[in-house]
Image (spheres, helix red, strand yellow):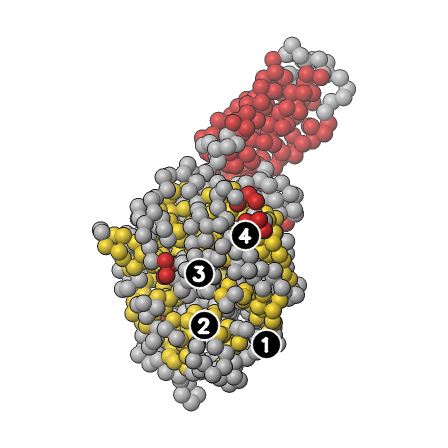
């Protein structure tokens, strides 16, 4: 039955319905041609029909739209279940248009007609569905928190309220026994002081990512240009500053200094207390911790030349990015090597130097097994070998250092790799700290072609297994896995299975038919994606992501990378779990894990054919000189620069190490500072965001973390995953926080670097921010 609608026909609404229908129909045809869902094409046809009927003023338009809405709700629930974030892009646009359409119908004299009422009811149903599920999401209900165990506090946590190592202790647990800040008063935690380093390299990919030390009643940190700074821990006032005047230019894609080391010698002729650091220009330096002056008895006037034995070094292609570690009197360093430039890049050799004199102690060069000396004459350490750019850990009692290793350069082509490279790539390796001899190693990815180098610091903790206290090691990886090992000999303490993976090697290379899967421990970012897991902030960019997902090669984890099309690598090259590692509640044997859920698109380009590949010129990549292929890569995002997979894009989780079970998992961070097209919309939507950096855990049951693109630091209740405190930072806190007891006031401080991160598009900054309880919380000296 026709109705005489007024002349005020909703032209704008009709245009919106027509444009939405056009996008649905065109995209739907493309998606179906790729084997995807028919929903979008059918929805587009329904929207065209609605517009055509509206032009004829036919009430049936409302009935058609109502049927579309009801079908969309059913389809959405079947695809997304009860996940509100997954349902949102499927329902909100058509729901709003449905309300608008029903409103026009009612205003145009159709109050008694069924069409407007049904359309309005269907739209209301879509809205109610979202509102009813708003609190459901992906959050896991908290499982019972394990009871307290006895632990060796002298090994797992500083006993004097200091923070003397990058990871709190040599074991890298990031666990503090401090309890002044606790669940009852954390809401009163407030800014105490702020210090600015004065080093910001705009336009350069240099990140302030340091974790300060607090020892010798002083805070010590380094900048991305290797300036070493000492601060008063109570006020943040600068005590001294040493600038080695390095030239920061060079081939490094990322330049940073994540920390320094501290040591003391009561019998030293000078510098009884020392700060040890490495520079971007291949120097190892020792400074007087009290004055900042170079230690004359160390090396040559306080400096050791790290270029010795390295052969030809192009500036910026090799430098020490993470804090040195000192085990049994030896300073042990690895180093970052430029990714994906060529074969035969500088060596990934691990070296040790005497902490008192700076004298060379040993080298572990996997290309020269059994030879731990310095190369002689024109020889050099083996070039192109896997390197250790992430933080290391040590065990003084066992006399071992534990290093996370990357893969041989370049990342995405391995046809040239030697047996030694294949053995140690993407592994955690234990070396004798006095000799450099390898004791054991465990490989987390075989013949790594995905840039899944092991980046996170190994965390050491003692576990009770079958009634025996076992010295364990937790190795987090960029693949999103946790490997649990006996740190004495590398024996697995949690089951790992070699699982079959797809194998389609590029000509001249090969692929491992199996990969290790840590099946007994909880895993992160390991789900196999499907088309229905694609996301967007609207159904249109969600449709774009579904099409893109169907266009690229994706066969689950370890999808082969080829030259005919892009391959989806998930988790992406950033992980998973990156250099931030995990923190461990040593009293309760619980690990706290922050991870990312974002994919990467990678494609090999035949040498010399780059100009023949349309649409890749704007993408990042690497030449991979010396191989048949260069490559390009991009993040798997929509045209609005939002990740194509469903949120959360970042998570914070707790893992019971005794029962090997997941206690809770919650989104980490909000979208306040990361809107579409890199805008800042200030809407704190709790969708979880990508993150670089790690956490710390206190004995009082608080987990502190920054790490996100969102300019914020948070404290989680360790037992439940609830955010119990949050404070705004001046920039993204992409660094590991630390905590300490200040002798002057007796207060506990929490400090984090707010330096931003170029890769995650967080503006660079130079802030060191400290938080403490009000002065009335003054306490007695730490006991």
Q: Which residue is mark 2?
A: 263
Total labels: the figure holds 4
Which dot marks residue 160? 3
Counting residues from the N terminus, which is met first, the one under dot 1 or under dot 2?
A: 1
Residue in the image at 73% along x and 22% along y:
9
Q: Secondary structure at mark 4?
A: loop
Residue in the image at 48% along x and 43% along y:
183
Q: Which residue is mark 1?
A: 244
Q: Position of residue 625 (x, y in %)?
A: 49, 71
- Which-is-in-front pick, marks 1 and 2? 2
Counting residues from the N terminus, which is met first, the one under dot 4 or under dot 1?
A: 1
| Residue 22 visible within the image | yes
Neighbor class of circle 1 (other Cα within 10 Å; few <14, some 14-19, many 20+) is some
Which of the 4 image quadrants contains residue 64? top right
Do the residues under discs 2 and 4 have CB atoms within 8 angstroms? Answer: no
Q: In the image, is residue 59 above or below residue 84?
A: above
Which dot marks residue 778? 4
Counting residues from the N terminus, which is met first, the one under dot 2 or under dot 3?
A: 3
- Which-is-in-front pick, marks 3 and 4? 4
């Amino acid at each position: 039955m026709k109705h005489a609608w007024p002349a005020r026909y909703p032209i704008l609404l009709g245009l919106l319905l027509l444009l939405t229908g056009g996008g649905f129909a065109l995209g739907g045809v493309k998606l179906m041609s790729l084997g995807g869902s028919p929903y979008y094409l059918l929805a587009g046809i329904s929207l065209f029909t609605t517009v055509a009927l509206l032009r004829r003023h036919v009430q049936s338009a409302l009935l058609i739209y109502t049927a579309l809405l009801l079908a969309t709700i059913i389809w959405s629930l079947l695809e997304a279940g009860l996940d509100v974030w997954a349902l949102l892009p499927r329902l909100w646009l058509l729901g709003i248009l449905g309300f608008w359409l029903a409103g026009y119908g009612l205003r145009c004299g159709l109050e008694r007609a069924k069409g407007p009422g049904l359309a309005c009811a269907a739209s209301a149903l879509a809205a109610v569905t979202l509102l009813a599920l708003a609190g459901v999401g992906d959050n896991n209900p908290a499982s019972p928190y394990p009871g307290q165990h006895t632990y060796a506090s002298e090994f797992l946590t500083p006993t004097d309220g200091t923070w003397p190592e990058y990871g709190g202790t040599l074991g890298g647990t990031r666990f503090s026994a401090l309890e002044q800040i606790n669940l009852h008063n954390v809401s009163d935690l407030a800014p105490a002081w702020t210090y600015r380093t004065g080093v910001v390299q705009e336009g350069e990919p240099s990140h302030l990512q340091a974790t300060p030390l607090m020892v010798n009643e002083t805070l010590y940190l380094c900048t991305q240009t290797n300036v070493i700074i000492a601060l008063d821990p109570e006020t943040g006032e600068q005590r001294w500053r040493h600038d080695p005047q390095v030239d920061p230019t060079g081939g490094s894609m990322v330049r940073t200094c994540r920390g320094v080391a501290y040591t003391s010698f009561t019998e030293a002729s000078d510098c009884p207390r020392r700060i040890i650091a490495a520079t971007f220009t291949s120097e190892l330096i020792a400074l007087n911790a009290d004055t900042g002056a170079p230690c004359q008895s160390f090396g040559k006037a306080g400096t050791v030349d790290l270029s010795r034995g390295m052969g030809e070094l192009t500036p910026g292609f090799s430098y020490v990015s993470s804090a040195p570690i000192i085990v049994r009197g030896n300073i042990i360093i690895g180093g970052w090597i430029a990714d994906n430039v060529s074969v035969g890049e500088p060596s990934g050799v691990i070296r040790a130097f005497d902490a008192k004199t700076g004298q060379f102690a040993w080298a572990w060069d996997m290309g020269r097994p059994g030879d731990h000396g310095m190369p002689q004459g024109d020889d050099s350490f083996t070039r192109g070998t896997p390197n250790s750019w992430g933080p290391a850990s040590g065990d003084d009692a066992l006399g071992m250092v534990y290093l996370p290793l990357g893969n041989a350069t370049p990342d995405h082509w391995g046809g040239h790799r030697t047996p030694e490279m294949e053995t140690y790539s993407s592994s955690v390796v234990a070396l004798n700290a006095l000799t450099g001899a390898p004791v054991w190693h465990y490989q987390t990815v075989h013949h790594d072609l995905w840039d899944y180098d092991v980046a996170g610091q190994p965390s050491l903790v003692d576990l009770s297994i079958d009634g025996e206290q076992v010295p364990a090691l937790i190795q987090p990886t960029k693949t999103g896995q946790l490997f649990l090992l006996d740190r004495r000999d590398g024996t697995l303490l949690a089951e790992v299975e070699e699982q079959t993976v797809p194998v389609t090697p590029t000509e001249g290379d090969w692929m491992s038919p199996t990969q290790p899967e840590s099946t007994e421990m909880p895993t992160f970012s390991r789900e196999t994606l499907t088309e229905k897991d694609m996301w967007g902030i609207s159904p249109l960019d969600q449709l774009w992501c579904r099409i893109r997902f169907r266009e690229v090669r994706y066969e689950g984890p370890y999808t082969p990378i080829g030259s005919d099309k892009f391959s989806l690598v998930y988790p992406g090259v950033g992980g998973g779990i990156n250099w931030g590692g995990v923190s461990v509640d040593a009293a309760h044997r619980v690990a706290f894990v922050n991870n990312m859920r974002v994919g990467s698109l990678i494609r090999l380009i035949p040498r010399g054919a780059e100009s023949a590949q349309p649409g890749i010129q704007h993408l990042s990549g690497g030449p991979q000189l010396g191989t048949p292929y260069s490559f390009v890569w991009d993040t798997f995002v929509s045209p609005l620069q939002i990740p194509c997979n469903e949120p959360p894009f970042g998570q914070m989780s707790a893992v019971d190490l005794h029962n090997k079970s997941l206690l809770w998992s919650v989104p980490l961070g909000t979208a306040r500072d990361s809107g579409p097209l890199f805008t800042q919309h200030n809407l704190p939507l709790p969708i979880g965001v990508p993150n670089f950096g790690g956490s710390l855990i206190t004995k009082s049951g608080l987990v502190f973390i920054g790490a996100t693109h969102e300019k914020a630091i948070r404290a989680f209740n360790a037992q439940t995953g609830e955010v119990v405190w949050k404070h705004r930072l001046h920039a993204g806190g992409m660094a590991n926080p630390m905590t300490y007891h200040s002798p002057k006031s007796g207060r506990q401080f929490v400090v984090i670097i707010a330096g931003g991160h170029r890769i995650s598009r967080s503006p660079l900054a130079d802030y060191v921010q400290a938080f403490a309880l009000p002065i009335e919380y003054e306490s007695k000296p730490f006991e």
